[in-house]
Amino acid sequence: MTANERNIGTILHLSALGQYLFPFGNFILPAFIWSAKKETSPMLEAQGRSVLNFQLSVFVYTIVLVGLGLLLTLSAFTKGMIAFQWDDQSFAIRNLENISFSTGLVVGITAFVLFALLKITEFVLIVYGALEATRGKVYHYPLSIPFLRKRVNNNNAQTMDSTSEPKVFTSE
């Protein structure tokens, strides 16, 4: 692994902090660097895939936590008046009218606290991933959903000539 690969790997991890510069910078910057460098180095291909999988995972966790926090907090303050109905003309979320004020507020605030902890953890893990890249290691983020998987390289596949019998592979 060259020093250039380690430097680009470090920049790849730190580019996820682009979210603090402009919206979706945590996706755009790493995707741009990854797409430019993934063909040149297997290490950079793995680093980029790891960064993007983590950022997509954090996005999913954020949507769930913020959505849950908003829904339950609003339900607590409106005392269940947020009862939407999905018939011909409206949308319903059932059983929110049975949530007490304290339950909705506690669960809603807990979701927002978990969101804050998620963002702090995200920042720390990005910096740690960059440090690991400077050491020449591919860092795999914890709790990362593998949205982008490694491509299978068919260049090493065996070619069959007309005289050979097809091979049958079985799993035992």
Image (spheres, rainbow, N blue to C red):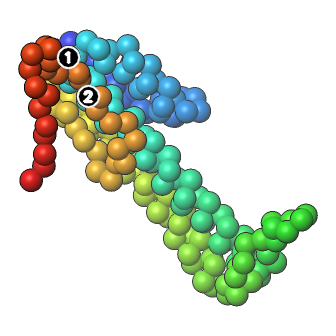
125 relative position to 120: left or right = left
Label 2 to label 1: alpha-carbon separation: 9 Å
Say if residue 57 shows up in the picture: yes
Residue extending farthest to the right is: 89
- Tell me: 156 left or right of 128: left
Residue that label 2 marks: 152
In front of the other: 38 or 116 = 38
Image quadrant occupied by the N terminus? top left
Q: Is residue 123 visible?
A: no
In this view, which residue lies farthest toward the front?
A: 163
Judge the density around disc 1: few (<14), some (14-19), many (≥20) Cα neighbours within 10 Å. few
Q: Is residue 123 left or right of residue 7?
A: right
Residue kind at label 2, given as amino acid type: Val
Name which residue lies at 70% across and 87% down: 98
Where residue 148 sits, quadrant-wise, is top left
The picture places residue 115, in percent across and down from the top left corner, at 49, 58
Q: Is residue 55 above or below residue 46?
A: below
Q: Secondary structure at mark 2?
A: loop
Crowding at dot 2, Cα within 10 Å, few <14 / some 14-19 / many 20+, comes out as: few
> In front here: 45 or 135?
45
* Residue located at (65% from left, 72% from top): 72
